[in-house]
Image (cartoon, grey):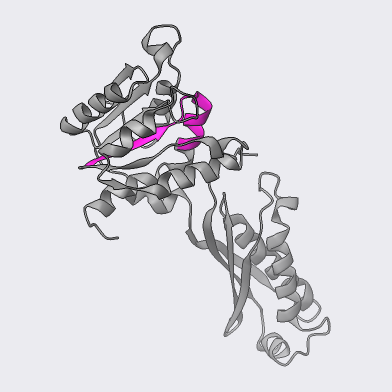
């Protein structure tokens, strides 16, 4: 199965459809008048289709178990055809396209089974996905075409050469997935004045995204939030609220992070944890959706 543990929950919607074609008008009349010997075709097949949506992961090996929070099955009779439309919704980490199509297939197969005693020439055709919403495909528009990015590693030990930086490489790898590269990277000690000087220099140089890693914890030398907060014109608390919520689902210590984020002029400053694992989880929590902030700040609408 594909690993989806790094993904965040979003509203996922999928709509699929399929067609049943019968061979004679009498079959359609039997359905409408509820004269099919095996019972009410639409009610039986709807129940089967709803169950199929919920049980998809049990028969399709790579599908994840997920909560089906809404499902509907609609039938439209057009001459000798019955169109089946299935809509499925969930708030989860992965989409429900297969669930919707599985619902169509089992609904259609149930109809076939119920009608075969009275019609020996029934066809199931055109099972397809009509629409999907949610996940990263809905956020492609949010990627800026070009964004000057700077990374600042705040660490006494790394600045003294006593330890090797690994978080910078993690940041670069994640940014690359969104066609972003680090234009400049520096290492500085955990000193409020030095952090502020570096931040002001990068802001003045026009870097729109400035990522600080390190110094967001609770030790005496963790001072990055204290250094950055006075520089912000407009704090964006939801960024780090999202990161802490995401992290708390993975470790009980995420609540101890004091990271902050906000704008200083046209520059978005984000303070990340110092550990590679903490950096990765924080960036997984907020990227790529945080990039939409640049369109919002310019007043763009979609």
Judged from this view, the residue extending furthest toward the top is 161
Q: Residue furthest bottom?
A: 33
Residue 254 image position (x, y, % from top left): 56, 37
Is the N terminus in the top left, top right, bottom left or bottom right quadrant?
A: top right
Q: Position of residue 151 (x, y in %)?
A: 32, 26
In the image, what residue occupies the spot 76% across and 77% down?
44
218 lies above or below 244: above
Q: Residue furthest front?
A: 220
* Position in image of residue 190 (x %, y %): 37, 20
Residue 81 can be seen in this image: yes
Specify whether 87 is left or right of 22.
Answer: left
Q: How many marks?
A: 0
- Asked if residue 221 is positioned above or below residue 299 in the image, the reply reads above
Q: Nearer the viewer, residue 193 or 117?
A: 193
**Can you tell which quarter of the image residue 263 is in?**
top left
Residue 230 in the figure: left or right of residue 134: left
Of residue 79 and residue 49, the one placed in the foreground of this image is 49
Q: Quadrant of residue 47?
A: bottom right
Residue 279 magenta-highlighted: yes
Please indicate, yes or no, whether residue 7 appears anywhere in the rendered image. no
Q: Quadrant of residue 203?
A: top left
Give the residues drawn in magenta, as a range.
266-282
Q: Residue drawn 31% across and 49% down? A: 293
Q: Give above or below for 76 relative to 184.
A: below
Position of residue 103 in the picture relative to residue 137 (left or right) = right
**In magenta stretch: residue 11:** no
Residue in the picture at 32% in, 31% down: 227
Q: Nearer the viewer, residue 27 or 7?
A: 7
Q: Quadrant of the C terminus?
A: bottom left
């Amino acid at each position: 199965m594909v690993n989806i543990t790094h993904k965040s929950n979003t509203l996922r919607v999928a709509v699929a459809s399929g067609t049943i074609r019968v061979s004679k008008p009498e079959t359609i009349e039997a359905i409408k008048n509820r004269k099919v010997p095996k019972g009410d075709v639409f009610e039986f097949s709807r129940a089967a289709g709803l169950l199929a949506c919920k049980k998809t992961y049990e028969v399709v090996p790579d599908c994840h178990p997920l909560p089906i929070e809404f499902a509907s099955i609609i039938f439209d009779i057009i001459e000798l055809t019955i169109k089946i439309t299935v809509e499925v919704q969930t708030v989860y980490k992965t989409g429900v396209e297969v669930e919707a199509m599985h619902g169509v297939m089992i609904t259609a197969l149930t109809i076939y089974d119920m009608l075969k005693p009275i019609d020996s020439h029934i066809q199931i055709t055109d099972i397809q996905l009509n629409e999907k919403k949610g996940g990263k495909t809905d956020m492609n528009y949010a990627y800026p075409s070009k964004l000057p990015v700077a990374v600042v590693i705040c660490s006494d030990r790394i600045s003294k050469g006593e330890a090797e930086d690994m978080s910078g490489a993690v940041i670069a790898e994640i940014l690359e997935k969104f066609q972003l590269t680090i234009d400049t990277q520096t290492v500085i000690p955990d000193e409020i004045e030095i952090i502020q000087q570096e931040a002001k220099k990068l802001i003045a140089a026009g870097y729109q995204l400035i990522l600080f890693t390190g110094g967001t914890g609770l030790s005496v030398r963790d001072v990055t939030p204290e250094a950055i907060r006075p520089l912000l014109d407009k704090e964006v608390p939801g960024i780090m609220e999202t990161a802490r919520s995401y992290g708390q689902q993975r470790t009980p210590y995420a609540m101890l992070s004091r990271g902050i984020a906000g704008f200083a002029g046209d520059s978005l400053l984000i303070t990340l944890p110092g550990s590679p694992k903490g950096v990765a989880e924080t960036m997984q929590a907020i990227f790529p959706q945080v990039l939409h902030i640049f369109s919002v700040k310019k007043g763009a609408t979609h």
